[in-house]
Image: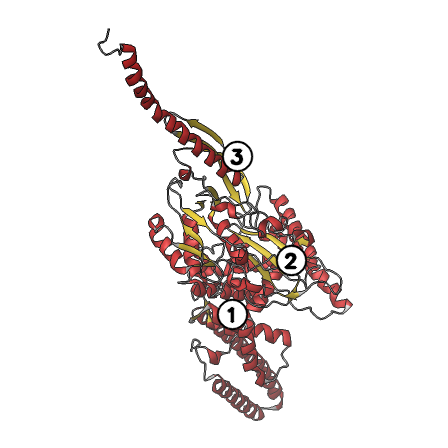
Amino acid sequence: MADNGRSATDIITYIGVPLAVLGVLPIMYNTFLTLVNASKIKRMLRHSRLTALTRSDVVNRIIEIELPRYAVTPWDRFQHRQEYWQLSRNPSSIPGGSWTTFNWKTNAIGFKTQRVEYADQLRQPQVDINFDELISYLLDLGAVPDPHGWRLLRSTGLWTPVGCALMKSPDGHHNALTLAPLDDSDGNLSLCVTWKPEWTTRSFSDLPPYWVSLPAPPPEKEQPEKEKTEDKAVDEAGVASSSTSSRPVTANGKDTQVSQRNSLDSATREGQSHATTPITCQISVEGIITALTEEKRRAGGIARNNTMGGASTIGGSTGQPTGTSFPLTSTINLDSLYIEHIRVRTGTSDGVWFASAATAYGTSSQTILWNYRIPDDILAFARRETVPCGVLVLLGAADESETPEWATQHRFDHSHSHNLFVQRMNEQRAAQQAEARLPQHQREAAARERQMRESMQRLDDMRQSQQRDQERREQREMEALHSAKWDTRLVAEHAMRWLLKQKKGNNSEDGDGDASQKQAATDLKEVAGHVLHRMVRDGEFSSNLCRMLDRWKSWADLGGMKKADLQALRGDMETFVYATLLMALIKDSTTALDGTLSVDLQECMRMWRKVRLG
């Protein structure tokens, strides 16, 4: 009952219904916004070619997206050339998806679930990638490292400011690789990449990072048939003798010797056909993993100077022309050489020596990145002065006038011999005069006795002279072993001069000494490249050379050279010369690397093996 004609139902209708509608409006608003944002997110995922599972909570205005997480690696440079060098046709525009700029070989490693309210909160999961593979790939495309960024990353680590540039575009005006926020990194280093097609300044014909081109030595003169037969017999005898002194790698000694001999023979036989062809080696963290030489093609095939374009600033390129070679384009037209004898293995140091020397050969002041780290003990060995200068004099590699005084000078040998000769002549004259005063029958007996006495004196004098000479030779050797030690580079220069003299013969004029010395200093690196080339293709030579390096390092570590070491050098002086060339290379590489960008790069990549890219 109401006085004004309004009932309770009317009051509920006019007041309750609007209140109910007002209560539903937030739910309707949340539903509308959720549907709109879900539609935007699906459209973003569709444009970025991403497959994701989406769920919506319209009441709480939450959208749940489940995206896969990937581990990526670059495609093979030779077999997937198109994917390697071209950018992706459908890069993602979602934050965190900068890695989709390139084509990658992907592997799903899990899922990441996100809960967002708005479309602009969506983030694409970052991918896991090996740091060295990422840097190597960008360098291969033409990116240029920023020294300030790498120095800052090395010193401050994860505290490096977001946006700090590590890699620049080839012109140096744009950032190619920068530090990203740590939101999705789970404690890993977080990076963001940017690249444009016009920034790719290198191609498949350039030498990739972590590769080094070893020049082939010049062809030798043809030997007469008789010498070839003798050399073959000597080589066969050498293989048989070296197999008895090779280092075992298995428990069965007989099987080890046979397998190692077969290994060296395989490398030698296979290398003979590639003696005049440049070899390209890939050096990884674990040493050599590939050695390639291009197939011989018909005359008129593609050939070019192996300066490798812009590779002079990439790790693995020497920046020097090494003769003509075919461009490194595809493994289909490349022959893989036998390299088991120079692989890094436990129990043998041959692979370590080769990888260290090849790394040093490819290192210069312009080298940015090298994958293999030369062991610290080898670097310390290369820096030390370990070869006595007197030993080089005894071996004929140096003149005594070029060394500081180290040997005792015997200045009275000539006068002593003259005095002894005068004494013996006077004794003989006195004896003959005494004989002349004797009767005839006694004179003949006295003459026979005198002649016998003189013969014994001559034998004694000869024996004493030989003993004195032997003592002086031993004294000279001991003084040579304890003489002042020379720097590795200086030893290599004198050894190289000795090698050139042996190659040219001993008939050269005296005026050619200075020219030979200058040529030796100039050709050190080139000849060292030839030595590495021969190590790849000649297993026997590589084994002997590494054995010589082991002996050299052994006497350096044990405090000095011994007589046995001197005799070993006398027996194989040429191998020691080659060993000095490799050690000079390693020493020079330490000078080139100290305080340069490559040190910061290597340290950073050792600190972070895997990084997050997005």
Q: Position of residue 306 (x, y in %)?
A: 61, 65
The residue type indicated by label 3 comes to Thr
Tell me how far mark 3 sits from mark 2, CA to CA.
51 Å
Can residue 570 be seen in the rendering of this structure?
Answer: no
**Residue drawn at (62%, 54%) of the image:** 291
Q: Nearer the viewer, residue 603 or 509?
A: 603
Quadrant of the image containing the C terminus: top left
The residue type indicated by label 2 comes to Arg
Q: Residue under label 1, please give it.
A: 492
Q: Position of residue 111 (x, y in %)?
A: 47, 33
Can residue 235 be seen in the rendering of this structure?
Answer: yes
**Horizontally, is 202 left or right of 602 in the view?**
right
Q: Earlier in the sequence, mark 1 or mark 3?
A: 3
- Indicate which label's residue lies in the foreground, 3 or 2: 3
Q: Which mark is residue 537?
A: 2
**Residue drawn at (48%, 85%) of the image:** 416
Residue count near mark 2 (Cα–Cα under 10 Å), binned few <14, some 14–19, many ≥20 = many
Q: Nearer the viewer, residue 247 or 192?
A: 192
The residue type indicated by label 1 comes to Ala
At mark 3, the secondary structure is loop
Q: What's the image's color scheme?
A: secondary structure
Q: Position of residue 454 (x, y in %)?
A: 57, 82
Q: Position of residue 338 (x, y in %)?
A: 65, 52
Q: Which mark is residue 51?
A: 3
Q: Nearer the viewer, residue 275 or 362?
A: 362
Residue count near mark 3 (Cα–Cα under 10 Å), binned few <14, some 14–19, many ≥20 = few
